[in-house]
């Protein structure tokens, strides 16, 4: 086998607040001969997901933390450059938990754990497989459809509207006949969300416009709020709910680098007054499996 030199970024110390250079170590390793059942993937692109910040923390969560010294966990797409596994051939494009490195050597156990699967570039580009056809797209779809249950004519608000999850949520809700209002940071992003993604409106939270924007663009209140950011924006949206509103807790990016306790919603009694509900949703591998079955992707 041609010898491959791998470069990796490893977690060297757990960050407190915003991560910095000191939290990382950079290593180089020669990739050895493959054993039976193993696959070597050249990584072509990685997804830098907000969730990665949580994986750096110690403590119980929905997934084990990245250990000190371990290659940083990340989802990515790549190409098989060596294989001793009959399910993966040289040149196959794949997606899965590849880690922040140049090459990923997967044992049969890793293949399962990191959900390595073939992807079909006729269905989408490499980047679309990381975005709308990947984890963020599935998160948007299942969160919106299962919890949001959008109905024509309803008003949906989504924060992080220009981000990977938010942009998909808004476009799906438009397809479902909702009036869609995004919340994003800065004029350029807000213009893009309206002009390119065809949302009905987008509120610039960096201009302090959330309260007035909700009043202006959601005069009958918010039926569905897809929350990607938590914090103050969540609190403000809670004061504008319509009866029987549904709130999807997808993430709380405004809180991830907090050194204090996560700020909880002050205005939660609005859920009581409006007979509304708020539900968290984690994207799970099962949902990718389900999508593949629905779309008959296993045949590639
Ligand atoms: N539940 C799940 O299974 C699941 C799966 C995937 C993602 N998520 C969560 O969904 C959220 C969005 O993920 P994504 O992949 O779409 O992320 P993304 O593409 O990286 O976009 C995140 C955006 O959040 C905005 N943001 C950052 N700090 C903020 C703050 N303090 N206040 C308000 N907005 C802020 C930024 O946009 P602006 O420039 O507009 O501020 C940023 O571009 C995250 O909270 C993530 O953890 C959850």
Image (cartoon, rainbow, N blue to C red):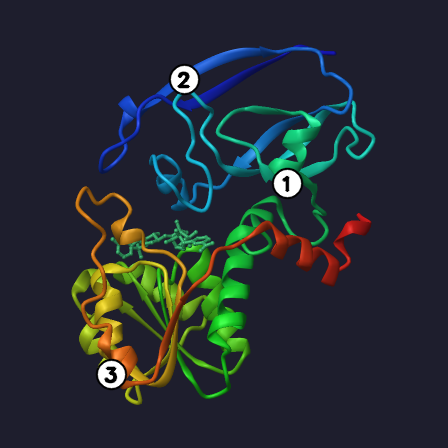
Towards the viewer: 217 or 136 = 136
Kindly identify the residue that appears in the image at 24 percent across and 83 percent down.
216
Location of residue 127 with respect to 195 vertically, above or below: above
Q: Quadrant of the N terminus?
A: top right
Rendered location of residue 118, percent (x, y): 71, 42
**CB within 8 Å, label 1 to label 3:** no
Secondary structure beneath dot 2 equals: strand
Name the residue beneath numbered marker 3: 216
Q: How far across and down, in percent of the image, does residue 22 sit?
A: 27, 22
Q: Which mark is residue 69?
A: none
Along the polypeptide, which appears first: circle 1 or circle 2? 2
Residue bearing the label numbered 1? 115
Q: Are marks 1 and 2 in contact (CB under 8 Å)?
A: no
Residue 40 x/y as whole percent: 67, 24
Q: What residue sits right under mark 2 in the picture? A: 26
Question: With respect to residue 51, does 243 lie above or below?
Answer: below
Label 3 CB sits under 8 Å from any ligand 1 atom: no
Q: Residue at x 62, y 27 (%)?
A: 42
Camera-side residue of 166 and 124: 166
Q: Is 212 displayed left or right of 176 in the figure? A: left
Residue 297 in the image: above or below residue 259: below
């Amino acid at each position: 086998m041609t010898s491959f030199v791998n470069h990796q970024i490893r977690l060297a110390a757990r960050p407190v607040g915003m991560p910095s250079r000191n939290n990382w170590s950079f290593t180089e390793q020669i990739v050895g001969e493959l054993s039976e059942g193993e696959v070597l993937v050249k990584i072509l692109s990685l997804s830098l997901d907000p969730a990665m910040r949580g994986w750096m923390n110690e403590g119980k969560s929905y997934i084990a933390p990245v250990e000190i010294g371990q290659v940083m966990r990340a989802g990515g797409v790549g190409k098989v450059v060596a294989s001793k596994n009959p399910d993966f051939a040289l040149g196959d494009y794949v997606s899965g938990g590849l880690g922040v490195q140049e090459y990923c050597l997967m044992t049969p156990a890793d293949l399962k754990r990191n959900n390595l699967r073939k992807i079909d570039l006729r269905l989408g580009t490499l980047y679309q497989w990381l975005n709308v056809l990947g984890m963020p797209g599935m998160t948007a779809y299942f969160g919106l459809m299962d919890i949001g249950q959008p109905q024509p004519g309803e008003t949906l608000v989504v924060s992080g509207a220009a981000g990977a999850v938010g942009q998909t949520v808004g476009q799906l809700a438009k397809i479902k006949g909702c009036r869609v209002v995004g919340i994003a940071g800065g004029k350029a992003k807000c213009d893009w969300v309206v002009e390119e993604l065809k949302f009905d409106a987008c509120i610039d939270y960096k201009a302090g416009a959330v309260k007035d924007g909700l009043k202006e663009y959601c005069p009958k209140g918010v039926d569905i709020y897809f929350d990607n950011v938590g914090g103050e924006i969540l609190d403000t949206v809670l004061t504008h709910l319509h009866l029987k509103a549904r709130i999807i807790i997808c993430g709380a990016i405004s809180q991830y680098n907090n050194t204090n306790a996560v700020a909880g919603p002050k205005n939660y009694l609005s859920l009581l007054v409006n007979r509304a509900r708020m539900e968290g949703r984690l994207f799970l591998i099962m949902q990718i499996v389900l999508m593949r079955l629905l779309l008959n992707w296993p045949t590639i």
